[in-house]
Image (cartoon, helix red, strand yellow):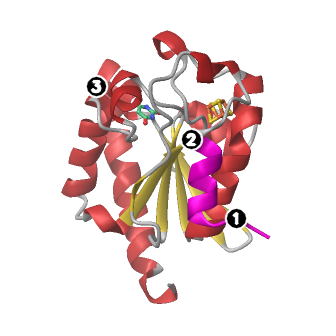
Amino acid sequence: MNVSWEELEGMCLSCHKCSLSETRHNVVIERGSRTARLMFVGEGPGEQEDLSGVPFVGPAGQFLDKLLIAAGFEDDDYYIANVVKCRPPNNRDPLEEEQAACIGYLRRQFLLVRPKIIVCLGRIAAKALINPDFKITKERGVWFERKGIYMCATFHPSAVLRDMSKKKPAWEDIKAVRRKFDELREEK
Ligand code: URA
Ligand code: SF4
């Protein structure tokens, strides 16, 4: 049986299962609607997220918000979480053991939100959720169906900010997410 939102929040806020707890300012759990049928998953909090306790509020998040607004999404159309809930120092990739320690919380978030669509933001989330050998450049924008849930991955917004040639494909991916979202509108 899954835990309640209150229990999950309590577990995350008091968690010391990996060493990221030693350097965090805040545990970063979620943003958006807990009943959304669309969920985005990033890799882990950056500096602004660590300071505010809210996912995707820094430059990457602001860019993501622009794409989502341009695709016609409203704030309560989606829910956002990360593979790890505490900031990796200097924004390094979260280590395998940190991801393994934390992923159970994300799985509980899936069970509570019950999204119809999960979009992985970047390579780390795609490897953790779709396939450990996932190749973001080749496989972004491809839909995978698992137990009635549609999953895909796109470039991480930070990667797009570093390399603007990724902007067009990222926008195509978000538009495809919009189409899938509209297609499944009747189902939740
Ligand atoms: N990058 C992520 O992967 N997640 C955040 O919450 C912010 C930046
Ligand atoms: Fe716990 Fe996850 Fe934070 Fe590690 S990253 S301390 S597992 S909440």
Is residue 184 placed above or below 150 in the rendered structure? Answer: below
The residue tagged 3 is 164
The residue tagged 2 is 13
Quadrant of the rendering where the N terminus is positioned? bottom right
Q: CA distance from mark 2 to mark 3?
A: 36 Å
Counting residues from the N terminus, which is met first, the one under dot 1 or under dot 3?
1
Q: CA distance from mark 1 to mark 3?
A: 41 Å
The residue tagged 1 is 3
Counting residues from the N terminus, which is met first, the one under dot 2 or under dot 1?
1
Kindly report which numbered mark, 1 or 3, lies closer to the viewer in this rendering.
1
Residue 143 visible to an observer of this rendering: no
Frontmost residue, 80 versus 178: 80
How many labels, in total? Answer: 3
* Residue 64, quarter of picture: top left
- Residue type for callout 1: Val
Residue extending farthest top: 90
- Residue type for callout 3: Met
Quadrant of the picture in which ligand 1 is shown: top left
* Residue range of the region highlighted in magenta in the rendering: 1-13
Q: Is residue 132 left or right of residue 140?
A: right
